[in-house]
Image (cartoon, rainbow, N blue to C red):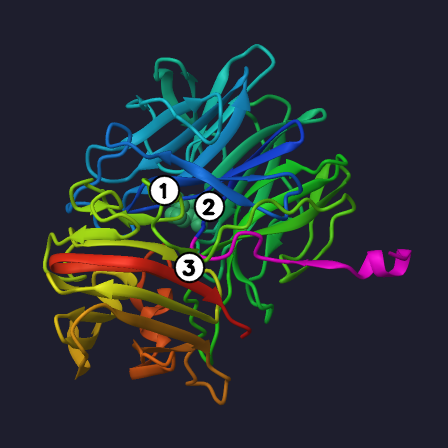
Amino acid sequence: MSGKQQAEATVSNPVIPGFHPDPSVCRVGDDYYLVCSSFEYFPGVPVFHSRDLVHWTQIGNVLDRPSQLHLTADTPSSAGIYAPTLRHHDGRFWLIVTNVTEGGGNILVTATDAAGPWSDPIRLPGVPGIDPDLAWDEDGTCWCTVAGVAQVRIDPYTGETFGPPHRIWSGTPGSKAPEAPHLYRIGDYWYLLIAEGGTERCHGVSIARGRTPDGPFEPCPANPVLTHRGTDRPVQNTGHADLVQGPDGSWWMVLLGVRPGGGTPGWHVLGRETFLTPVTWVDGWPVVGEASPDLPAPAWPLVPGPVEPGRDDFDLSELRPQWISLRDRPAERCTTKERAGWLTLRARGGSLDDPDVMFVGRRQQHPACRVRTLVDATEGRGGLAVRLDEEHHYEIEASGTEVRMLSRVGPLSTVVASRPVPAGPVVLGIRISPTPVRGPRSGPDTLALGIEEPDGTFAPLGTLDGRYLSTEVAGGFTGRVIGLYAASGTVHFDWYDYEPLAP
Ligand code: 6LW
């Protein structure tokens, strides 16, 4: 590659597409590890591995046992697990995270391998608040910093805190929600990186520095060091960042951002995604590049990791780590062991309106995609759904010799259409296509839900505007999850196939 081509080369951003917010990253030698929030889904806290900061492969989930994460129907959507921090210290990984649900609070788990197993949680009753961070100073003292921004010294082995948390910074005067703190020793300073402005369009990243880990901190005169507020950039809501060094010693930031589609005000449908952007240092302050969809390629060789197949034939005894279910996953209700090569779901709760519905899905990661499944609903009723929360979902479901398309938008539930099908397994499908923007009221995308005819053609029962399954309509912190569910009886799925399409 010539020097000019090298300079122009780009890689695609988000580096982890789909609902993967609040990224926290750490480097261990040549390897990088990254974690995200998971809210009401189980298992919680997806863990990714990379060798180049650009290609990420999910290697597990941190909270994958009920002894680590116990969510119930009392955990509302967009509650549960918020904003982990991942660090490597003293030969092991440390992860601190908040369960915002009643009785939860901040917990800390450790592992020698980021793929797991992770320990049972150490509770931190003396650490109130969300977005906990961990940093160790030269003496081995562990500093825990939370949104607000407040700080307390802790013993990470026991969860003991030393004194009450005290305020160390409030961010930029007048700016709301100083949160997502991360504290680093870089050169001669301790840097305190935060998000502020709220996680919506005003989101931004600011930084302060001090000589000691507990301050006093001097704010960067150029704050916010990153924000896309008030711009027409394609990536918006940029914030909640973490810093990391590339293999060549250059500095990078992982952060969350969204890709709004449609007209006004713009609807984002994939949730908050993980982006990467370069950082340089000038006069001891970070200068952060734009979180662009075309990221200038890093200077080091790219090392693509294994790519997770879009198709799952349910031939393994356990579901791959990408599969997330709602709140829990009882083995007797969700198993690939009952009928070889099939996923069997046994209903609990009557529909996707119910917080305890048996639903298991994967994140929608591409603006255009096609999802299909072969379902056997001779002993029950269930199918394929696109879910944002209990009040926002579209589904195509089979029961016996009937297929129905359903929608729930806020308080309104509709049977959009139904049609008879021959007895036996049927292929259900969903096609999602971005909408060309024709005016201010254009939606972000359309969702066609239907069945596949025996000759392979897709026969939609209906097509709906995707804005109703966007964060701007539904609210909350998550994004679309597309998956399989049982609404009554027992429903079997032979395969699930997710294919990205050209937009
Ligand atoms: C998280 C906060 C935030 O705790 O959103 O964008 C909250 N930032 O830091 C939930 O993801």
The span picked out in magenta is 1-19
Kindly tell me whether mark 1's CB lies below 8 Å from ligand 1. yes
* Position of residue 49 measured from the top left corner of the image (x, y, whole percent): 55, 38
| Residue depicted at x 17% and y 42% | 72
Instruction: Name the secondary structure under disc 3.
Output: loop
Q: Nearer the viewer, residue 179 or 45?
A: 45
Instruction: From the image, tell me which residue sits under label 3.
Output: 271
Instruction: From the image, tell me which residue sits under label 1.
Output: 82
Whether residue 499 sits left or right of residue 52 in the image: it is left
* Position of residue 296 measured from the top left corner of the image (x, y, whole percent): 73, 56
* Position of residue 165 measured from the top left corner of the image (x, y, whole percent): 38, 24
| Residue depicted at x 61% and y 52% | 226
Taking the image as drawn, is residue 225 in sight?
A: yes
Instruction: From the image, tell me which residue sits under label 2.
Output: 22
Instruction: Name the secondary structure under disc 1.
Output: strand
* Amino acid under disc 1: Tyr
Kindly tell me whether mark 2's CB lies below 8 Å from ligand 1. yes
Distance from disc 3 to disc 1, alpha carbons, whole Å, reads 14 Å
Res. 429 mark: none
The stretch drawn in magenta includes residue 376: no
Cβ–Cβ below 8 Å for labels 1 and 2?
yes
Instruction: Name the secondary structure under disc 2.
Output: loop
Q: Residue furthest bottom?
A: 438
Whether residue 22 sits left or right of residue 476 in the image: it is right
The answer to which image quadrant residue 160 occupies is top left
Label 3 crowd (10 A; few <14 / some 14-19 / many >=20): many
Taking the image as drawn, is residue 410 in sight?
A: no
In the picture shown, does residue 56 fall above or below 463? above
